[in-house]
């Protein structure tokens, strides 16, 4: 594990400009075209271990879900659907989620899902690094340690930065910690539990942006996502895709 001291931090040579992930949706929709990102961002993330969409040709789709807290019985319902449909999901969990929902986390593991790192305290990378490199590293490593302590398993080697925030310094550190930073090629405003997207509109939006190699970011607190998941799985398969775990 990389460690630093105040007088000799090797990571200060890497810029810590606070960046936010974004992508350009495919146009026109419903043509199974890949998303795009700014060429400068593409060049930056290519230097480090990152994923945001996979190359076309494999006919695979990747469903990822962020878990900051539990809402009603959503995750249990999502797991029920995943089990019935026999599909894997990659769940990105925080420390709070782990501590308060251990039976659900153990169920994720038992049913073959990937459980990955969304940081312990949901700290945005660049501001955390502005405090210190060790402060940021601890936010990632403390979740991995707690996960090992409570489950007896190793957390999957994927890290989703809170709020989609990142910096070049953060990308380098995460890579040195043995993780791949995972962004996405689809996301929408689904995380407000009291302002959920319309179910039909949500399905149309997700299916319209779907493409070979898609990494979907969905929030498990979303009632809409629970309602649309089974239909979405059926649609994905009807298009000839396989829903797969993130590649290690």
Image (cartoon, rainbow, N blue to C red):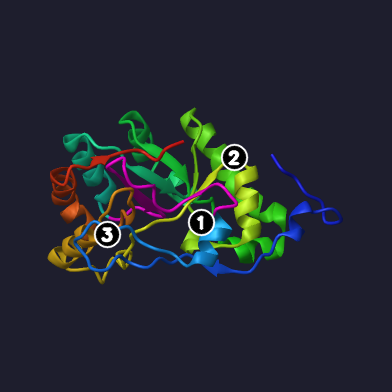
Identify the disc placed on residue 222.
3
Q: Position of residue 225 (x, y in %)?
A: 23, 56
Query: Which circle's residue, 3 or 2, is located before the other in the chain?
Result: 2
Residue, x 26% and y 70% (percent of image)? 194
**Dot 1: few (<14), some (14–19), or many (≥20) neighbours within 10 Å?**
many
**Mark in the foreground, 3 or 2:** 2
Q: Using the image, tell me which numbered label, if any, was put on residue 161.
A: 1
Q: Is residue 112 above or below residue 24?
A: above
Q: Can you see residue 198?
A: yes
Q: Nearer the viewer, residue 168 or 174?
A: 168
Magenta stretch, residue numbers: 46-71
Quarter-of-image position of residue 109: top left
Measured in 3D between alpha carbons, the distance from the residue under mark 3 to the one under mark 1, in whole angstroms, is 19 Å
In the displayed structure, does residue 241 sit left or right of residue 1?
left
Check disc 2 and report its element: helix, strand or loop.
loop
Query: Which numbered disc covers residue 178?
Result: 2
The residue that appears at 22% across and 65% down in the rendered structure is 29
Q: Earlier in the sequence, mark 2 or mark 1?
A: 1
């Amino acid at each position: 594990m990389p460690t630093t001291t105040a007088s000799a931090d090797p990571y200060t040579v890497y810029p810590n400009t606070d960046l936010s992930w974004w992508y350009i949706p495919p146009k026109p929709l419903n043509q199974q075209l890949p998303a795009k990102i700014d060429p400068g961002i593409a060049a930056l993330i290519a230097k480090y271990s990152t994923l945001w969409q996979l190359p076309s040709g494999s006919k695979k789709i990747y469903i990822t879900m962020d878990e900051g807290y539990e809402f009603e019985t959503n995750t249990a319902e999502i797991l029920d659907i995943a089990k019935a449909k026999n599909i894997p999901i990659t769940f990105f969990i925080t420390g709070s989620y782990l501590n308060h929902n251990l039976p659900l986390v153990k169920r994720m593991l038992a049913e073959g899902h990937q459980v990955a790192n969304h940081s312990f305290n949901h700290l945005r990378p660049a501001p955390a690094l502005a405090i210190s490199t060790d402060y940021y590293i601890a936010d990632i490593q403390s979740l991995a340690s707690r996960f090992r302590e409570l489950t007896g398993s190793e957390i999957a080697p994927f890290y989703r930065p809170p709020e989609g925030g990142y910096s070049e310094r953060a990308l380098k550190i995460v890579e040195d910690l043995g993780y791949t930073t995972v962004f996405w090629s689809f996301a929408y405003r689904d995380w407000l539990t009291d302002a959920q997207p319309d179910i039909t509109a949500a399905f149309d939006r997700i299916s319209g942006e779907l493409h070979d190699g898609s990494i979907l970011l969905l929030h498990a607190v979303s009632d809409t996502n629970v309602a649309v998941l089974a239909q979405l799985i059926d649609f994905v398969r009807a298009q000839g895709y396989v829903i797969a775990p993130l590649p290690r």
